[in-house]
Image: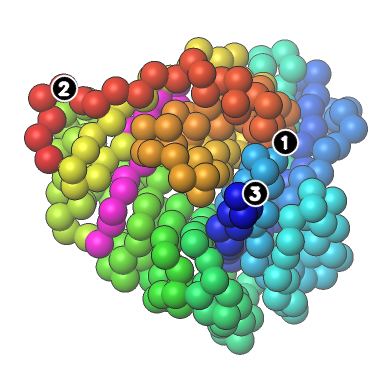
Amino acid sequence: MAEIAQPEIVTLTINPAVDIATSVKKMVPYTKMRCAEPRRDPGGGGINVARVLKRLGLEPTAVYPSGGATGRTLTTLVEREAVRSIVIPTSSDTREDITVFDEASRQQFRLVFPGAFLKEPEWQQCLDAISRVSPQAAFVIASGSLPPGAPADFYGKVARASKGAAKVIVDTSGASLKSALEAGVYLIKPNLREFQELAGTGCADEPSLLAAGRRLLEDYRIEIIALSMGPNGALLLTRDIALRANGLPMEPVSVSGAGDSFLGAMVSSLANGDNLDTALRYGVAGGSAALLNPGTELCLGADVHRLAAGVTVSAIAGDHA
């Protein structure tokens, strides 16, 4: 039997970073705190998703802007993980973000800096890259916040630039997400806070979430909503089905990148031709597996497959599409 070619998957990270993770014995104000040896990972939503996809056996291509010495470090870190890249040079230095783990309280502190300013020709080159590669792509995944200089409707422009792709996935929030939904996308993956903001609700009970999700599916051009809810699992909604996945009890080492790991593991399952039940199970397993590792190490493939067996997905009783 002839080997079936893997679907081309392209990720876009318009606001990348070099993620630095370290730990201290105890966070104390006005005191010089000795840190552990720092760990550096390539970061930003789409890059993280690409890293997860690679660990799960797929061959994604990551598109991202990169500038200055930090940008060169970012590119080196991406190459270290053997992820193919299309790098857009920029005049501004790529940002760094810092995560500090307090060993005494076992709390994590995340310091996120403003992104590098992008000039119009620079963010336009990112869109042009997506336009070039999307006709061959089964999935285009645009993920993360917007940097200074990028227009508020940038993700809507991404969705339109990806018109050749079979499935466009966007993982962002606020006005950026709405602009993508108006252009039309295949899947969104908000967390609970992002979903409530998008739907204009403060409710978190299941019937209210289902009703809000149905309204979003009616109001916007979305095929799938995958709502991640941390330890409470996840919901998946389409116009025809509603699924619930249980959460897994975990003692988190780090929460950084859990959402990206959820999305990467879920897309890997979809790319392998699995049904939505299995894809949701792998999404929860990916997000949970990320909690086992320090800093922004993200999930490991072996952990995802192991944990997926413990995730139960069921149709929500009494739901009527």
Disc 3 on helix, strand or loop? loop
Residue 223: say if magenta: yes
Q: Which residue was labeled with disc 2?
A: 317
The answer to the question of whether label 1 and label 3 lie on touching residues, with beta carbons closer than 8 A, is: no
Task: Check the image and report above or below for 121 versus 79.
Answer: below
Q: Which labelled disc corresponds to residue 58?
A: 3
Task: Check the image and report above or below for 120 versus 6.
Answer: below
Q: Which residue was labeled with disc 1?
A: 297
Cα distance between the residues tagged 2 and 1:
37 Å
Disc 1 on helix, strand or loop? loop
User: Residue 168: percent from the left, percent from the top?
Assistant: 42, 62
Q: Is residue 198 left or right of residue 219?
A: right
Mark 3 residue crowding within 10 angstroms, few (<14) / some (14–19) / many (20+): some
Disc 2 on helix, strand or loop? loop
User: Residue 216: percent from the left, percent from the top?
Assistant: 20, 51
User: Residue 197: percent from the left, percent from the top?
Assistant: 30, 47
Give me the residue at 50% from left, 75% from top. 135
